[in-house]
Image (spheres, rainbow, N blue to C red):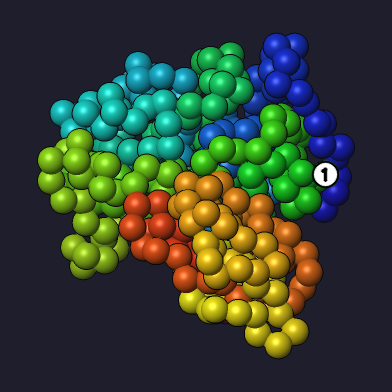
Amino acid sequence: MSDKTTLVLTSGATDLDRAADLLRAGQVVAFPTETVYGLGADARNGEAVAAVYAAKGRPSFNPLIAHVADLEQAQALVEWSDEAERLACAFWPGPLTMVLPLKPGHEVSGLVTAGLDTLAVRVPAHPVAQGLLQRVGGPVAAPSANPSGRISPTTAAHVLSGLDGRIAAVVEAGSSAVGLESTIVGLSGDPVLLRPGGVPREEIERVLGREVPSPEEVSKITAPGQMLSHYAPRARVVLNHQRAEPGGVMLGFGDVDGDLNLSPAGSLTEAASNLFEYLHRLDAMARPIAVAPIPDAGLGAAINDRLQRAAADRDQA
Ligand code: TXA
Ligand code: MG
């Protein structure tokens, strides 16, 4: 479906003006954030949002995150609360997404929320994302800029490898520093951890002064679209291995070395930032991927969540 030429834009002011113009005109534009590259569309324009789902080949029941430039823009969209305020003060701009009740009179397309009465909002820290969102002046819906079910992109090259010819433009600005998606906290009732991510759960619990369980832990599912194999590479993935399988490749961590090592020093921050890049590289070798054990604390919980999805049976995609 390569029916258009995808513009590759720089992060200079003129190109950001152009990217913002494209977004306001209802086009789909990929842009860098500190977590992963996002596939942006004007969140108030249903046709533009539909084009995001189409480019990704994503099932339409999976709601999207609305990205805004600042706190004030977020407060215009959702019902604010004391706990939202505390988390925003501590972690915005940054890799935290909050799910809050939609405000009456909001102009967000129902395609963004997939018909829910809550909205996921995030203020990204990346200066290029900031520059773009300030120019657009309204919410930009943006899932990760990869075809549905594939590895999330942390460079413009990753975006193009999956979506070239399917989107209007990509803004290129190096590698995403965090390297995995934002943490999603549901705040429409007691706080729940809807997705582990760039801000460790422990830090959120410290700021709120209480436990933030996952939906599984409160034994009801409130994270629609958390399909198990969402992050699946094409190659088979097995976890907690000490060495590669015969004919396979190895993704190491710490002392457990491999063809690539997420962090020879055993740093979870470094491992997170390398995760998707290394999965992309090993996936290109089209051989089974064995992954070393990763400690489950802090960012390790988010890394293991992504790895478990990568290892899940493809039939569930
Ligand atoms: O780091 C990130 O969050 C990246 C960058 C681009 O900002 N974006 C991202 O978006 O990961 P996406 O669409 O790949 O993931 C959004 C997740 C989905 O798993 C979806 O189920 C959840 O957010 N979500 C969105 N709206 C929700 C809502 N109203 N209630 C519960 N979950 C929601
Ligand atoms: Mg994604």
For the residue pair 222 and 282, the one nearer the viewer reads as 282
Rendered location of residue 47, percent (x, y): 61, 37
Vertical relation: 46 (above or below) 312: above
Location of residue 12 by image quarter: top right
Outermost left residue: 210
Secondary structure at numbered mark 1? loop
Residue depicted at x 27% and y 37%: 101
For the residue pair 138 and 305, the one nearer the viewer reads as 305
Location of residue 282 by image quarter: bottom right
Callout 1 amino acid: Gly
Vertical relation: 110 (above or below) 259: above
Residue with the mark numbered 1:
165
For the residue pair 59 and 248, the one nearer the viewer reads as 248
Residue depicted at x 74% and y 52%: 162
Residue depicted at x 66% and y 52%: 277
Left or right: where does residue 311 sit relative to residue 90?
Answer: right
